Image (tube, rainbow, N blue to C red):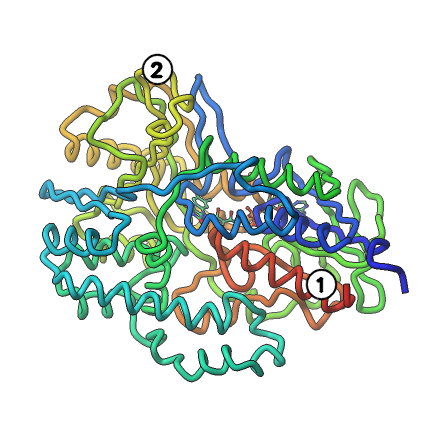
Amino acid sequence: MPSVTDRRCAVIGAGVAGLAVAIRLAHAGWAVTVFERGAMAGGKMGELRMDGHRFDRGPTVLTVPHHIDALFTLCGEDPRAHWRHQRLDPGFHYHFEDGTVVRTWADQDALAEEFAARTGTGRDRMLTFLKRSREKLDITQRVFLERSLHVPGNYLNASTLSGLLRFGRIEPLTSMARSNAALLRAPKAAAILNQFASYNGANPYQAPATLNLISYFELALGSFHAEGGMYAVAQALEGLARRQGVRFHFNAPVERIAVERGRATGVVVGGLREGFDAVVSNADVLRTWRDLLKDQPAPRTSLALPRSSSVIVFHWGMRRTHPTLGLHNMFMSDDARREYDRIFRDRTVHDDPSVYVHISSKMNPQDAPGGHENWFTMVSAPNNSGQDWDALVERTRQSVQTKLSRMLGTDIASAITCEAVTDPRTIEALTDSPQGAIYGNSVNGILATLLRHPNFTRRIDNLFFCGGSVHPGASIPLCLFSARITADLVRQRFRA
Ligand SMILES: Cc1cc2nc3c(=O)[nH]c(=O)nc-3n(C[C@H](O)[C@H](O)[C@H](O)COP(=O)(O)OP(=O)(O)OC[C@H]3O[C@@H](n4cnc5c(N)ncnc54)[C@H](O)[C@@H]3O)c2cc1C
């Protein structure tokens, strides 16, 4: 048997989960090589520069930063020497058509007071919502966020068993929208809390109320700002990986995973095969099976599930500053139910969409020229199933500008100095996510969550999967859980 340091692992993809798994395995003594088809690390957590502005391309909302810090402390480093963050207070500004603005405060009592005063829900109802969401997080964290669902031995410990016994408490059979309407009895409060489903590309009118745990991350544990923007986090993780000895190959698409006698034995890049003891794919799982494992019989259930939704983002340089806006601003649709129907049933974008405006230059002045701002203006969209995206983008640009001009009382179009657009086609082209789906498969049902592809496959030994398209799911926190589960599985498999 080779010693631990002789073990070699290939990681396909330098998304946040690929970086985290590489760091964990390198720290455990593995020789890790990351192959990334793009020119830089981060995957969806990329950045864009245009006319003196800097924009994050993907994630903008940072929660549970201690999970990122944990990678540095694992390696004996001070995270603050490599990246910095601060808690936001207020976190979000929610704008309604009637002029109501609801802010989310870091203090839970202040948050409950704000919701009571501005939406008409009861203060105690809001506190009950937070308590129930906390319980959902506690139960799911034990049962599946922190471990593989697919290793029978994982069910045989006290904390998982106690979580399973309380499974009904996570409301798997009630929709988010129904649960929130019944508890909060205030349409504006319910609308704010329902929209957290979109953090996972789900429809709150179909997705289980279990997903209310998503809002707990932001509303109770806090929303944070990463100094220098989210891409600075990807750069910090790449730096940590390099210091742990991880080797990176950029512009190096893996063409095939080599499989011999039921075992992954290496990867093929540029027509050349390189041997490895283990292979971890951070590429989308559908792509991994369809393109990199063409000759292997693929599992049917988890790959047949519908894909999650996507987004259209307008990256706008703005010639003015807007003092009433914060870092995170959401302009709510007047008819959210119809908005979700348009996305998930009609596979198009609503004429009155909810519009998220993220202005990182509020916190990072260097992200825009003086007196200017950088607007990341995003609406939810269906994934790409062949729609006429040029027409849809054009129509959405008009409706977003009309809505923001109306709600802010200023002409938005005349303030725009430059524009770049990200739509499902762009997301697919940049990160190879089929149909430009942001979150892998859809989680519009509890079964879909449980049927997510595992972090390993019984069909091919020594092949593992991590990232937003597999267990436990998408978003930075879940990708970090995914990386930890996967690194543990690799180490258990090799007892290293
Ligand atoms: C617009 C947008 C907004 C978002 N907002 C948030 C947010 O606010 N907060 C949040 O937590 N999450 C957010 N997300 C989701 C979050 O970004 C993702 O869940 C997460 O970044 C996915 O990381 P990942 O590790 O799964 O891989 P990805 O980021 O998908 O990276 C996979 C990598 O694999 C590479 N790859 C693929 N195939 C190959 C191959 N054959 N060979 C080599 N390399 C390959 C790709 O190029 C890519 O770099 C957002 C996403 C988007 C797109």
At horizontal 44% and vertical 37% (from top left) the residue drawn is 226
In this figure, which residue is indicated by the disc labeled 1? 490
Residue 220 % position (x, y):
32, 56
278 relative position to 345: left or right: right
In this figure, which residue is indicated by the disc labeled 2? 370
454 relative position to 474: left or right: right
In the rendered image, which quarter contains the N terminus? Answer: bottom right
Q: Compared with residue 144, is residue 395 higher up or lower down, i.e. above or below?
A: above
Q: Compared with residue 255, is residue 179 higher up or lower down, i.e. above or below?
A: below
In the rendered image, which quarter contains the C terminus? Answer: bottom right
Residue 237 lies in quadrant: top right
Crowd around label 1: few <14 · some 14–19 · many ≥20 (10 Å):
many
Identify the amino acid type marked 1: Val
At horizontal 20% and vertical 56% (from top left) the residue drawn is 109
Residue 285 lies in quadrant: bottom right
Query: Which one is earlier in the sequence, the residue at label 1 or at label 2?
Result: 2
Residue 398 lies in quadrant: top left
Residue 191 % position (x, y):
21, 56
Q: Secondary structure at mark 1?
A: helix
- Front one among 119 and 66: 66
Q: Secondary structure at mark 2?
A: loop
